[in-house]
Amino acid sequence: MHPPRSRFALLALLAAALAGCADQSPTVPSAAPPPAAAQNVLEPYAGRIRIGIVTAATSVKIGATVGYDVREKGTNTYLVSGLANEQVTVTHNPSAAVATNNRRLQVVCTTTTADRDQRVAAGVAAGFPSAWEHVPASSCWRVYIGERPLPIDATAEATYKQNVINAGLATSAAIWKTVNTTIYEPRYVTTKTTGTSASSRNPPRISVASTARVLIGGTAQYRGIAEVMRNASGTLAGINDVPMEEYLYGVVPRELGPVAYPEVEAQKAQAVAARTYAHGNLGKHWNNGYDLVATVQDQVYGGAAAEHSVSTAAVNATAGIVATYNGNLINALFYATSGGKTSNVEDVFTGTDAYMRSVWDAPAGQELSSVSALLTDLRTPTWTGAYAGWHSYHRWNYTWTMAQMSCVVGDFANQPVGNVTAINVLSRSSTSGRVTQIQFVTDAGTFTETGTAIRSAMPYINTSGVPTLLPSTLFVVERLTNSSGALTGYRVYGGGNGHGAGMAQTGAVGMARAGHTYTQILQKYYTGIVLQVKNGTRRNGISTVPTVLTDPYDCTSA
């Protein structure tokens, strides 16, 4: 006979075990794990880049220009097939019914669906097959995190269980069970137009021969692989997984049009800059399932439809070459045209990259005498020495009525501001002439903005009456008055289009026309750099899913 204390201890252990088996109480602490996004295991760069074509949607269509199979990423399990140019629709079901007959690790039988769903999401995010099963008799939902095949392997199950515990998703009270029933787990659902569908735990993808093209989010064609996976917000992303150099085939012609600008050396310079940017930003949006997006947020990517023989040749001629400074990939910023002088990077962005210094965008001996002379030329253009002096945005000017300026500044301030009684340039770069801080004095108070954000704080009104991003921060402001001296509006005289840091694309064209090589072009705009073959390193970047914001003010009637 056991002493009384030992007997009571054994009874307590037995009661706890029975409680777990009978689903009477949770087998993990009552606090649920924090909500988690879909898992996206960091993949080392191996010559391919992932581009977010569709960044956020409840469903994404994918297909191919030839007959194809849709298969599960990782397992290569067949899901459905499609005909040439037919598209399937991918959705995500957080609780898809799945028949199972295997071993499952039960971590809790919870009484709330919110706790159930949080735990399942956390398990999936950590890389464990996770599911739930309703138990009517106990009025709770069993949550399973982890699975093993039959027959029972106690040693392997113990190791697996410890891994789940180490991930913070269970305690030692979690128990393995043989589950032979229908359970519910998060699944991608791929559906044909006929209604036939198949589900998968991992993202569905389409891979075709190199001569064919995949379709993503519509009829647009892309090289490489089409894939759909959940992003950080829980919606779906349509992704193009494509070899780096083939990605550039669709970037370079969209960033520097080869029809308007067929100059070979400028196209090569653009190819190197675009490649450098891509390598330097691998993994920028990795929590959303891709490296870069296909818009100006990163680089404009047009897929197969954008490709052109001139830009493709430029990519091939510079294959693998990137720009480095002190052995590291540079932040290869570029933009349309400089207005005659580029900017130090810190004048428009945070950071002080030593290779992005202000330079005259003109041949030696044809520069203006000073920044002051540049500002004068904005108002009364006479300078003809700039490499891109022929460009339509080399010089520009816009006018606002009092009502229009009130509207756009109110939009910036996110409140009605009444009259804008003064616009003061508080600071200006001594090296590039760009405005670095501006002040709006209004009936409702004073508002300021800095750097390249000044362009969106003071948009001009286009011919359709729509507020439009100011081309650059290289400008001077003029007050407009009537014959009585009363303020009637404002006019801005400016130069350039874009932020102004790094390579001016039309300046590169001008240099190419003057006989310069792509190496000379790049080394002018990025001072002190070296060109070499070098790959980037993918990082586990975190970014928000792009959203469309609603403008609270309407300037179209101003």
Image (cartoon, rainbow, N blue to C red):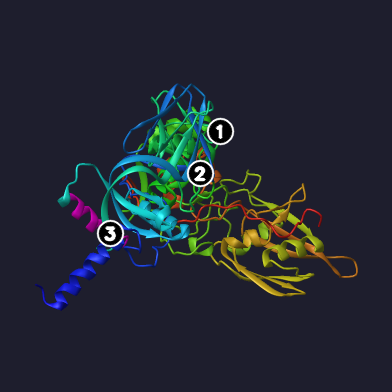
Magenta region, main secondary structure: helix
Residue 188 vs residue 373, the one in the foreground: 188
Residue beneath disc 2: 508
Percent position (x, y) of residue 166? 26, 61
Residue 63 vs residue 445, the one in the foreground: 63
Q: Residues within 10 Å of mark 2 (few under 14, many from 20)?
A: many
What amino acid type should be assigned to the residue bearing mark 1?
Answer: Gly
Residue beneath disc 3: 174
Give the position of the N terminus as an image quadrant.
bottom left
- Spatial CA distance of label 1 from label 3 is 46 Å
Q: Confirm or deny contact between disc 1 and disc 3 (CB under 8 A).
A: no
**Residue 127 forms part of the magenta stretch:** no
Q: Is tag 1's residue or tag 3's residue first in the polypeptide sequence?
A: 3
Q: Residue at x 55, y 67 (%)?
A: 430
Percent position (x, y) of residue 50? 41, 42
What amino acid type should be assigned to the residue bearing mark 3?
Answer: Ala
**Residue 157 forms part of the magenta stretch:** yes
Residue found farthest to the front: 1
Residue beneath disc 1: 218
Q: Residues within 10 Å of mark 3 (few under 14, many from 20)?
A: many
Is residue 540 visible to the viewer in this orientation of the structure? no
Q: Is tag 3's residue or tag 2's residue first in the polypeptide sequence?
A: 3
Which element type, helix, strand or loop, lies under badge 1?
Answer: loop
